[in-house]
Amino acid sequence: MNGAPQPPDIPEPDLIDRIANALPAEFQAGYYREMRYCRSLSENDEMLLILRAMQFWVVLMLQIPERIATERERLEQILADFLKALREIHQSIAIHQAQLDQRLVQLPAEVAEGIDPEAIAATINESLRQQFVQSTIPATAEALAVAAAQMKKATSEFARSASMLGDSYRGAAEEARRAVANLESTSAHAISSTKHAAEEYLEGFAIIGLRHERLPNLEEISARLNPRTGWNTTPVSGFMPGPAFFEMLSLRKFPTTTWLRKRDSLEYTPEPDIFHDVFGHVPMHAHPVFANFLANYGQLCAGVIEGHETEAAAEAMLERIGRLFWYTVEFGLIRQHGRVRVYGSGLISSNGECTNVLEGHCEVQDFSLEAVLNTPVQVDQMHQLLFAIESFDQIYESMQKVQQKIAAGEPL
Ligand SMILES: [Fe+2]
């Protein structure tokens, strides 16, 4: 109590006093004046009942601050605990966040370390290698590699050749056109010549399978000719020296050049070409008597070279024997059915020489060994004199006489 005077007529001073004590000091005097009336009320007065109830309210009101304070302290404790827990959680989260950040920072390196491309590639390669080895692919791959290298080389060479071809295409094409034109011209001339050729020549032409419209195949010719007379056509690159030429003839191998003259050389060419050799010479090699005659000529000349001590002496003898060769094998004529026909390759292969004879610009004498051996060869002009045989037996017999003269040491 705050020392205020205690009214003696208040039945339950403690109750009124406690309420008064709950009031601020400036309100207590007024409170007591108001409660004076209540002291005179009966025990069961409703006003007192209400007043008693109110004292519980007062008590409660007095206790509320304490309770509130207590509760506040408890709440504050709870809040503090909560905040503490919250801070701990926050710290824990921060720690874990930091750890997580650290892990994330380290992750690329760890990932990179874990997925080392070289290591993975090595693993894959080894796996593939083992599978590769177990298969048949290695041998195939090796073969492919070799093939690829060869193809690369071939491609390179092809490209280089193609480039060269490209550069020379026009020239090559023009050369090809000229070759075709030459063949056409020579074929036309051959047809013309064969109209005036000896029967034996025409028979031989058919036997060895010659055709005017195409170049001859020497292997095919030999295959047809050899069983008949033992002769072969042997391709050579060009002019042959005398000893080698005679040696080949003795063996029944006719050296045949493989080049074709140009159109402007149809009348004459200093060197024989394939047209002269094959179309001019070879058909007669199918005739048995002519074939023996020619082989004997080769044997005779080869013997002359071996039998003479000096080359000059041999050359003189060969020049005389060569006249027999020239006026028969090269420019021989034969009378058949009342006409002069040609069988010599120089006439067959030269339109000018052939025409010169057939048009009467060349004297034609009956064949005579003595006359032939006394007629020098002139290669720089059209022939003014040639000799016509009646049969090929004449030239074979003439060759026999020459051999006999040489064997006897007689002059030709
Ligand atoms: Fe010839």
Image (cartoon, rainbow, N blue to C red):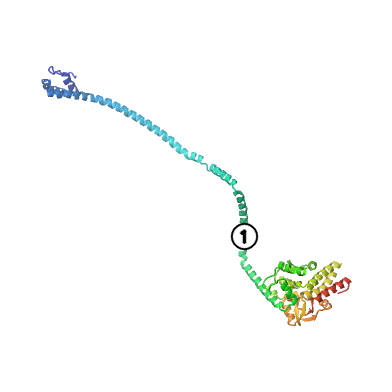
Which image quarter holds the N terminus?
top left
Q: Is disc 1 placed on a helix, strand or loop?
A: helix
- Residue 47: in sight, yes or no? yes
Q: Is residue 270 visible?
A: no
Q: Residue at x 74, y 81 (%)?
A: 358
Between 390 and 262, the one nearer to me in the picture: 390
* Residue 406 coordinates in the image, percent (x, y): 86, 71
> In which quadrant is the C terminus drawn?
bottom right
Q: Which residue is mark 1?
A: 158
**Among the 4 quarters of the image, the one containing residue 81:** top left
The amino acid type of the residue labelled 1 equals: Phe
In the image, residue 112 above or below residue 148:
above
Q: Quadrant of residue 312?
A: bottom right
Q: Give 255 or 18, whichever is nearer the viewer.
A: 255
Closest to the observer: 178 or 191?
A: 191
Indicate whether 39 appears above or below 309: above
Q: Is residue 306 left or right of 224 when viewed as pictured?
A: right
Residue 354 drawn at (x, y percent): 73, 78
Q: Residue 207 placed where, x, y %? A: 72, 72
